[in-house]
Image: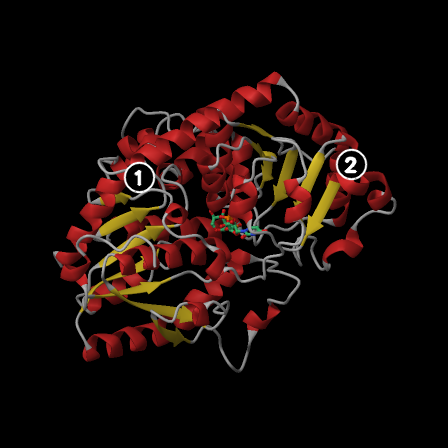
């Protein structure tokens, strides 16, 4: 285990209970955080839903407790198939519905058996706050997304009305210069009311928590921290990108394919565009074909993750347009699932075409790779706007997929001076991350504060 902490002896035997939301982009940061806290000496119990819990055997040093996440008579969650999640919002709502009783029972039993310092649960599991309150247990929230999402989410009804985010909460601070189109994307996928309800409950119960842990570092999102200071008065721990302490590969739900690595090793420096839309995003066949031809027509090298379910109702490469393989030849590779952090760290990787999930965004920043942002929904339009308009380390490609436009944008990042300037700015952020993690840096100090805070319960 890496980084055995200096105050580990004082924490050993003190247990922390953690409850991840069972989606890849949420499992990764929670499991990384669990490893960080374990390395500081805490004992870890993970409560997990049956759905998406394949990673448990890879963590023999943790205790796992399952909770029911579906109704055995009416197994709606079985609509999750190898072809992907059609409607993540409904999934969330259904899981919340089904697991409340089982979760409460599980946590009650745990507390009867031994002392627990606190619970850390995903911010989207908002119902866990009232369960924790009823059991007199402190709850710390894990925000699996950016800090900048909080002020935007907290003002969403206002934002929707105005159509443009100018101020955040009560401070006159421009946090993220969102457009009306960005806001519409936040709501995309599922009924708008249900989404707003979920977001409002998440924000409300985050405000009621004893603390917030964010997978970020202060220097990256300073304005967001300023903007929420008035309304979120609990301690906030920005302990830095979690994967810089522990990589995510062991919590991967899909097997990582490494067979292309020898091909990547042969490509020139900064010449390859890495393309991945995370674990949930879906698109139609027409959009997918346009993407394929955009990549082909760019004449640039690429590595493209086409996971099962990326195209709704389809299984990977058979969806590729006729003639694509012949056109691309040795210039491109397609994989089902990649060791993403390793790919981003590779010297050949020159740009990342992403859906702007927070883990992907942060992983890209940590390797100084500029981005092409095609956000789909949820927090992604917010992260994307930060990348393009705040940090200026990427370009937006969020209109209808068009092969010519795709080709132009790829060339801009890989060949043009503009792309190189973005790469330089991204490298400067990468440097800031590293400084924040060093002794005396903000993330390093925040982690020390978090350990002390948990010990104080
Ligand atoms: C979801 C949401 O969509 C995202 O917006 C939110 O911020 C977190 O939860 P997801 O869509 O899967 O996550 O995207 P992202 O946050 O980028 O997480 C994907 C993770 O899968 C990353 O850690 C990435 O390294 C990993 N990954 C992705 C792989 O290991 N291999 C791959 O081929 C692709």
Secondary structure at badge 1 equals helix
What residue appears at the point 78 percent right and 36 percent down from the top-left corner? 296
Quarter of the image that includes the N terminus: bottom left
- Choose the circle earlier in sequence order: 2 or 1: 2
Q: Is residue 101 left or right of residue 160?
A: left
- Nearer the observer, 18 or 451: 451
| Residue 288 percent location from the top left of the image | 73, 45
Secondary structure at badge 2 equals helix
Colouring rule applied to residues: secondary structure
Quarter of the image that includes the C terminus: bottom left
| Residue 270 percent location from the top left of the image | 61, 30
| Residue 243 percent location from the top left of the image | 41, 48
Which label lies toward us, 2 or 1? 1
Looking at the image, residue 373 lies above or below residue 8? above
Residue ID for mark 2: 296
- Nearer the observer, 215 or 32: 32
| Residue 440 percent location from the top left of the image | 22, 35
**C-alpha span from label 2 to label 1:** 39 Å
Looking at the image, residue 166 lies above or below residue 56? above
Residue ID for mark 1: 437
Can I make out residue 22 in this image? yes
Looking at the image, residue 61 lies above or below residue 241? below
């Amino acid at each position: 285990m890496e980084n055995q902490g200096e105050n580990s002896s004082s924490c050993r035997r003190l247990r922390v209970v953690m409850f991840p939301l069972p989606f890849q982009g949420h499992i990764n940061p929670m499991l990384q955080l669990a490893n960080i806290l374990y390395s500081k000496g805490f004992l870890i119990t993970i409560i997990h839903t049956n759905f998406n819990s394949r990673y448990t055997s890879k963590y023999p040093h943790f205790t796992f407790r399952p909770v029911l996440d579906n109704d055995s008579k009416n197994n709606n969650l079985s609509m999750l198939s190898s072809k992907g999640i059609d409607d993540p919002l409904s999934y969330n709502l259904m899981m919340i519905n089904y697991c409340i009783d089982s979760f409460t029972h599980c946590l009650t039993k745990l507390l009867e058996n031994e002392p627990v310092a606190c619970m850390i649960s995903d911010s989207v599991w908002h119902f866990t706050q009232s369960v924790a309150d009823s059991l007199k247990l402190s709850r710390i929230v894990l925000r699996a997304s950016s800090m900048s999402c909080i002020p935007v989410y907290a003002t969403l009804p206002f934002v929707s009305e105005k159509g443009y985010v100018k101020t955040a909460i009560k401070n006159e601070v421009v946090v993220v210069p969102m457009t009306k189109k960005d806001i519409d994307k936040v709501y995309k996928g599922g009924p708008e009311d249900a989404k707003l309800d979920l977001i409002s409950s998440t924000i409300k119960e985050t405000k009621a928590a004893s603390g917030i842990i964010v997978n970020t570092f202060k220097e990256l999102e300073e304005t967001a921290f300023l903007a929420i200071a008035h309304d979120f008065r609990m301690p906030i721990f920005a302990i830095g990108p979690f994967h810089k302490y522990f990589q995510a590969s062991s919590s991967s739900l899909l097997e990582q394919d490494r067979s292309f690595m020898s091909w990547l090793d042969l490509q020139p420096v900064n010449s390859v565009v890495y393309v991945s839309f995370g674990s949930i995003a879906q698109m139609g066949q027409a959009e997918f074909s346009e993407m394929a031809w955009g990549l082909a027509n760019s004449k640039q090298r690429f590595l493209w993750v086409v996971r099962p379910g990326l195209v709704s109702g389809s299984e990977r490469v058979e969806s590729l347009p006729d003639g694509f393989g012949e056109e691309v030849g040795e210039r491109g590779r397609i994989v089902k699932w990649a060791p993403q952090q390793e790919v981003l760290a590779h010297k050949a990787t020159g740009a990342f075409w992403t859906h702007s999930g927070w883990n992907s965004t942060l992983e890209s920043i940590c390797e100084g790779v500029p981005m092409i942002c095609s956000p789909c929904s949820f927090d992604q339009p917010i992260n994307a706007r930060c990348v393009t308009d705040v940090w200026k380390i990427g370009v937006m490609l969020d209109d209808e997929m068009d092969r010519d436009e795709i080709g132009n944008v790829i060339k801009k990042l890989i060949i043009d001076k503009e792309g190189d300037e973005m790469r330089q700015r991204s490298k400067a952020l990468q440097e800031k991350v590293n400084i924040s993690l060093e002794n005396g840096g903000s993330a390093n100090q925040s982690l020390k504060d978090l350990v002390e805070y948990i010990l104080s319960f």
